[in-house]
Amino acid sequence: MEATIEVTGLRKRFGGTTALDGMTFTVAAGQVTGFVGPNGAGKSTTMRVVLGLDAADAGHALVGGRPYRELRRPLHHVGSLLDAGALQPSRSARNHLLWLAHSQGLPAKRVDEVIAVTGLGPAAKRKAGGYSLGMRQRLGIAAALLGDPPVLMLDEPFNGMDPEGIVWMRTFLRDKAREGRAVLVSSHLMSELQDTADHLVVVGRGKVIADTSVAELIAAASGDRVTLRTPDRTQAMTVLGRAGGTVAATGADTVTVGGLTSGAVVALLTDNAVPFTEIAAHRASLEEAYMELTRDAVEFQAGQS
Amino acid sequence: MRHLIHAEWTKFRTVRGWVIGMLVAIPLTVLVGLLGPAGSQMSCAGPDGQPCENNVPPTGPGGEAVHDSFYFLHRTLTGDGTITARVATLTDAEPWSKAGVIVKRDTEVGSTYAAVLLTGGHGVRMQHDFTEDVAGPVSTSDHQWLRLTRDGNTLTGTTSPDGEHWATIGSVQLGGLGDAVQAGMFVSSPEHVEITRGFGSVDASGGPTMATATFDDVSVDGGWAGDWRGTEVGGESGMDTGHQESGGEFTITGHGDIAPIVPDQGSRGRTVENALIGVFAGLIAVLVVATLFVTSEHRRGLLRTSLAASPRRGQLFAAKAVVIGGVSFVTGVASAALAIPLVEQVEVAKGMFLFPASTWTEVRVVLGTGLLFAVGAVLALAVGMLLRRSAGTVTTVVVGVVLPYLLAVASVLPSGPAEWLTAVTPAAGFAVQQTVPEYPQVNASYTPADGYFPLSPGGGFAVLCAYAVAAVVLAVVALRRRDA
Amino acid sequence: MTTLHAEWTKVRTVPGTVWLLVGVVALTVAPGALAAGAMPSGGDPAKSALTGIVVGQAIVVILGVATVSGEYGTGMIRTTFTALPHRLEVLAAKALVVTGLVLAAGAVAVAGSVAAGEALLPGGLPFTGPVVRAAAGSVLYLGLIAVLSVGVAVLVRDAAAAVGLVLGLLYLTPIVATLVADPTWHDRLRTLSPMTAGLAIQSTVDVAAEPVAPWSGLGVLALWAAAALVTGAAALRLRDA
């Protein structure tokens, strides 16, 4: 079984609202794919269609090349976490995992293994209704791991986690990808994926806006700009502007230059005897890159209402 | 599928509230059942003031409770023989007053017999051993001549409109008939009963009756010995019964009845289904748990997890149905198996008598209660899957299954609508409890309020099943079509 | 007053409420009409025309239970108690709003039943004092069932269990009483149980034969409803939301 998720041309309407509008992307094995977009962009709907919970009006979604509903023991193929709150509150966490294990023909031993892996420990004997959101996320992850699946699909797994939990989750996701699994993680906060995702699928208004590696995305957002720190800002701007650069002041002693390579900037400043203390290629944060991409796709923009 | 059932079973047993709710059904069935006899203090201070404990009705050869009291004018018949008589008149007769010829093992109450008789309103009949009844030929002319022939243990009844042309009604085998038997003429006349049934009230009025018949053209053939003797079988009735003979014509006045006792409201006897009056309460508990087994998944969004784990939705529903149906079946069997002996014990202690039921009948009722619980639970599961709401689901199934039963048995409705309700609603399933047969030859009130369902146990159960199947089909279609 | 307004807005904006109220009317009028058409001679005309109350009350139970259990089921009860920390006031407002709605629907249902009875009963439905009492009392009966349901729901919280409990309590005695042979116990049972005592209000023929007088019977039901509400209130104060 290949470790992939393939989504092709999904369309779905809920009454008058278009939830999915030709959603198409592929999740590859061996890396963490971030699934990002503003609220209401269609991330959760896509995941529900992948899991066969919702039926798409058009298009199809395949897991390892097969529709989810055809899988005999689906948790052996895909582990998923959609809603950490989907629990019977009066049932203990361990028993929650136990019925899931039984549904896949897995022994109780496997339950204890995933409890250990996710660090639930002794709390697993307690009623799930009393869990914090972070604990529920861990329980959801434990459920996703039960069948030791080659594909993991997690909806907002960082929600409600404390800093320690976030660090744990990042390491966990990277480890699973390194083992050769395909990992799809949705989030509406790009910063959560900063050091986790290798690849990004950015969505807005029900379709894919960008399907790219993190490195490429940041490079594209950074452009060829150079950040310059200089005590003589006015002089520097005049010199560089005359040479055809796009110059913008970003602080009392900092300037961003576009259209010129850092080598050209150094040469120009030296030739004109403009002093500078620091020069560096500009690197956009993932957050910036994302904001730039989704500016048009944000469904509920401030000021619109 | 096996894994799914295992998973659903784990789901069920790991929610303590559901297990407790299911277990509560058992004591609930028993305790509510005990309320009936606990609130009944029997006093049998009739004219003779005999205590109830000794006032248990006699049983016939088949073990059933019987009335066996009549005026018997008899001689001893040894070996084979025949008696022929014409019932010239039958006066003051109730529809089931009887006058005719009879061969009976002895004058002991409940002993085996066969009789050919003329009734007040149901023509000529041949009856034997209390429960068996065959109608004579249907014709416009009166069949007043009656003849009963004994050949070993075989008794043959014939009748004739004129004493010349005889038609055979039937031939029956009696077990345990000695060589010498008592045979002759008899008259019986049952209580007059008039039942008026209104809304929430039942009025039964009536009283003892006597009928008088004159027999002429009496002839016997075979090993007859002794004189005609008059005996009040079943003890002194205290009524003005007796016989006279003049010129070969016998005038006999009799009281009582030779028939099975039919349980009805106010009867001192209790049936197996009376002990199971608490079943509806246990059933409500089971329906609540079955509803929660599905609606709690909807409420928490847990259904998505279940469907992600088992995308074959029809199978998922089937697994749920198997688990909740199985658990409910066991609960029902346990409830009935405990309620019957425990309630009956109190009933006997309170001076009631029990209508005997065979072991097979009791087993059938116990298993039937299990099936009633199981199919009711599956119905609740399906309705819950459709409605996705707890309160609406519980109300729908309780109103569908229990309310019609209440309206029918608590005489809230007159018997017509009551029978209709217990035939076409899911409450028809309560018929699985029925143990007492209706006897066409006994005039009684055969209504749901008296414990008689219009459908047979199997038929009533089939109606309940039909509702459950329809609900399951709708639920599975909805589950397949809907986005989870 | 704010609390009442808030509860009214809540009830009003749940789409199911209107349908349940329609259900109360439909399920009360239809069986009453059927029973009135089938009434044997010598029956109580008011009782048969108002038979539907026995069925319609089930929907009233849903209404009463859902107002409380619905909030516990979704966790909204915490929002409610955050906005309105005076819990007893919330409970009182809930009971008032539901009872008010049920009384209104009950009035329509009973009016419909009386009209159907007048049209379908062999002798019509005479407009006498006892008949008016039976009709007005039946409306009050439904209102008290609503209060009882709210009280039980606060105690039990879970919707399914609350509905099961209320319906079981209502149905228990009519069924069990059929097997209680001792007339004293039989009458005692019917006097003490909420449904049989409450429905004594519908008796117009041979009133003396009822084990309990009409208004006293409705009083018994009122006591049950009050007891459920008071116990529920005590539990509400003592327990965590």
Image (tube, coloured by chain):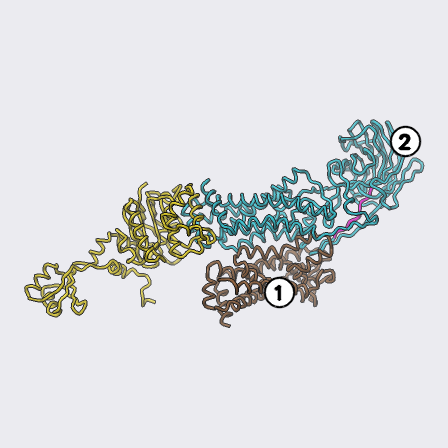
Chain colours: A yellow, B cyan, C brown
Q: Give whichever of B185, C66 is nearer the camera.
A: C66
The residue furthest front is: A122
In the picture, residue B128 is in which quadrant?
Answer: top right
Q: Give whichever of A178, B459 is nearer the camera.
A: A178
Whether residue C85 sits left or right of residue B46 in the image: it is: left
Residue A50 visible somewhere in the drawing? no
Chain to which mark 2 belongs: B
Residue C71 inside the magenta-drawn segment: no
Q: Residues within 10 Å of mark 2 (few under 14, many from 20)?
A: few
Q: x, y (%) of residue A12?
A: 36, 53
Whether residue B377 sits left or right of residue C50 in the image: it is: left
Q: Amino acid at mark 2?
A: Gly
Q: x, y (%) of residue A277?
A: 12, 64
Instruction: Tell me if label 2 and label 1 are in contact, CB under 8 Å.
Output: no
Cα separation, mark 2 vs mark 1, equals 76 Å
**Relative to B269, residue C70 above or below:** below
Chain to which mark 1 belongs: C
Residue B192 inside the magenta-drawn segment: yes
Residue stretch rendered in magenta on the structure:
B187-195
Q: Give whichever of B39, B279 is nearer the camera.
A: B39
Q: Where is mark 1, residue-wise?
A: C139
Residue B178 visible somewhere in the drawing? yes
User: How many numbered marks does the figure carry?
Assistant: 2
Whether residue A130 sits left or right of residue B150 in the image: it is: left
